[in-house]
Amino acid sequence: MSEAWIIDACRTPRGIGKVGKGALADFHPQHLAATVMKAIAERNNLNTAEIDDVIWGTSSQRGKQGGDMGRMAALDAGFDVKASGMTLDRFCGSGITTVNLAAASIMSGMEDLIIAGGCEMMSYTSSTADPNSVGLLDSGNLHLRARHPQTQQGICADAIATLEGITRQAVDELALVSQQRADAAIKGGHFDRSLVPVYREDGTLALDHEEFPRPSTTLEGLAALKPSFAAMAHVAIDEQGTTLGGLINRVYPDLKIEHIHHAGNSSGVVDGAGAVLLASPAYAEKHGLKPRARVVAMANIGDSPTLMLNAPVPAARKVLARAGLTKDDIDVFEVNEAFAVVTEKFARDMEIDRAKLNPCGGAIALGHPIGATGAILIGTALDELERTGGRYALITMCAAGGMAPAIIIERL
């Protein structure tokens, strides 16, 4: 079996995901995705006719984000028409899954050159969302709801914190660290290698820096914020008066949810795109492409759909076992900060050195463009390995439906 080499990774800055406030909010999603595709092709002097596939992640595939963004964005980027493309949805885990599938295709010997990644314009999807929707993943499938009650993610985060005894102070402290580390990383130029500016079609600059971080955040300021999901937990979803919080009580009948998550300790709503270039060793050597890393192992796993956010720990354990490594072998852990409790629980359950966990900050400070985040985190982990001289990085993230993909890469 061939190895899969990571040749390069790049991403856009993340813009505030609100119409009228974010620098990227007026972009077409395909054009934002094309920005990173074009950049990674130009940076590596690719003959785009030789790209076997573009594997792309987008979670909300409707309207402008529908219609196979992977293929359409590749055409928008000026790729040769021979470069095929597809788009997938594993909710928040889409960006890792695209890289994993690309690596698997190369390792099987079926492909030689693939661009993986994703894009999510949350400013667009929020503006087109049904105002009457409560965001239930079962889409009104009452049979599924009876089997696996699934509610809103923020309520799940609060339920997990309550079950685990994780306090408001603990999640606020993690959120503060995320902001501090992101600020230090930005000032230290840790993102410079991967970051590509975004230009409008007329050639003017739209965004060349992270738009979301709040470096002036304080613990006192976080403590003053009101929980975001308490009222939502009492929203009724049927004529019988079942509430969003009550869906969790179907599985945990005695649980009284303590609401501790708010805008300051939850992932930011942003627009962004990221891409990772993978190649077989034979193709890379023939075309003078220098590998930056290799894919060591990949894994997927499911956990409770009702709690939804708990799969990163079992995913990490599964991918470590497949790699024949231990947690102590890992130099960088990138675990998406969908909500602070996800990363806090990961640190506690895995008993890892917190200095290795999201060392450049996470989605609380930088934002979470859903379909793109996994690819962005892989690039961030690779940059950090190179900056510090580390060897292995493990990247994982929770995904709706109670899932988590994971990947381990080794710096070359």
Image: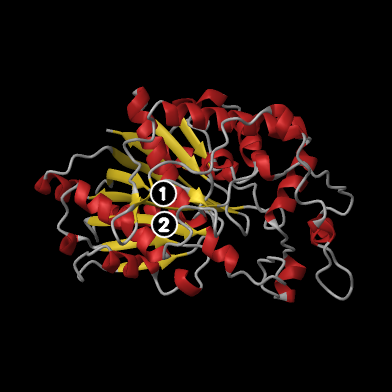
Q: Front-most of 252 and 128?
A: 128
The x, y position of residue 407, in whole percent, is 43, 44
Which residue is situated farthest in the left direction here?
286
Residue 350's disc is none
Asked whether the viewer can see residue 330, the reply is no
Q: Quadrant of residue 245?
A: bottom right
Label 2, residues with CA under 10 Å away: few <14, some 14-19, many ≥20? many
The C terminus lies in which quarter of the figure?
A: top left
Asked whether the viewer can see residue 203, the reply is yes
Q: Front-most of 331 and 365?
A: 365
Q: Quadrant of residue 381?
A: top left
Q: CA distance from mark 1 to mark 2?
A: 7 Å
Return the residue at label 2. 118
236 relative to 6 in the view: left or right: right
Return the residue at label 1. 375
Amino acid carrying label 2: it is Gly
260 relative to 24 in the view: left or right: right
148 relative to 96 in the view: left or right: right
Amino acid carrying label 1: it is Ala
Whether pointer 1 and pointer 2 mark residues with C-beta atoms closer than 8 Å, the reply is: yes
The x, y position of residue 161, in whole percent, is 75, 41
Residue at 66 percent of width and 36 percent of height: 345
Residue at 79 percent of width and 35 percent of height: 165
- SS at circle 2: strand
Q: How many marks?
A: 2
- 359 vs 105: above or below: above
Q: Front-most of 332 and 227?
A: 227
Residue at 44 percent of width and 43 percent of height: 377
